[in-house]
Amino acid sequence: MKRAIKQEKVISKRRVIYGGGTTIQFEADSTLQMQNIIWATGFQLDYSWIDIKGVLDEQGNPLHKSGVTKIPGLYFLGLSWQSCRSSALLLGVGKDAQHLADLIRKSDY
């Protein structure tokens, strides 16, 4: 990861405070134009901070099919049972990551 950041293949930014259209605004008052966002969920199951209509169900869980939401260009990775039992584990997340990467490559987003 450090090498990717140094080579500017990964851009490290502070907390997202707003998103609209293809513009993402960060806490440090900088913005980026994005076509796709993959939220890698990590170990916490609290999505209450996500304020995008149609992304969460009434219980506050992501609405998705294999990590793909109904919002064009918005994806999740690392969800429990995203596509199989090991989806939320380091051992199994690679399969789901590859699936999302393939979809994004083939899409118009």
Image (spheres, rainbow, N blue to C red):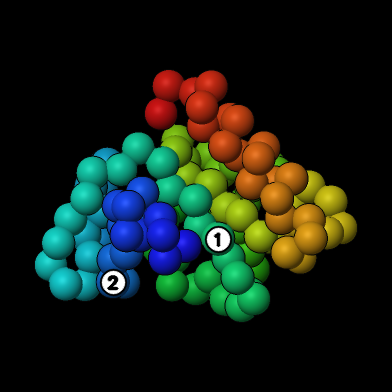
Residue 24 versus residue 69 in the image, above or below:
below
Residue 22 versus residue 56 in the image, above or below:
above
Few, some or many residues within 10 Å of mark 2 (<14, 14–19, 20+): few
Rendered image quadrant of residue 58: bottom right
The tag earlier along the polypeptide, 1 or 2, is 2
Q: Which mark is residue 40?
A: 1
User: Distance of mark 1 from mark 2, alpha carbons?
Assistant: 15 Å
Nearer the observer, 82 or 12: 12
Residue 90 position within the rendered picture, expressed as x and y whole percent measured from the top left: 73, 64
- Residue at x-position 64% and y-position 46%: 97
Few, some or many residues within 10 Å of mark 1 (<14, 14–19, 20+): some
**Quarter of the picture holding the C terminus:** top left
Residue 85 versus residue 96 in the image, above or below:
below
Residue 71 versus residue 107 in the image, above or below:
below
Residue 87 position within the rendered picture, expressed as x and y whole percent measured from the top left: 76, 57
Secondary structure type for disc 1: strand
- Residue at x-position 17% and y-position 55%: 31
- Residue at x-position 50% and y-position 57%: 39
Nearer the observer, 71 or 16: 16
**Residue 81 visible in the picture:** no
* Residue at mark 2: 14
Nearer the observer, 103 or 2: 2
Rendered image quadrant of residue 57: bottom right
Residue 10 position within the rendered picture, expressed as x and y whole percent measured from the top left: 37, 54
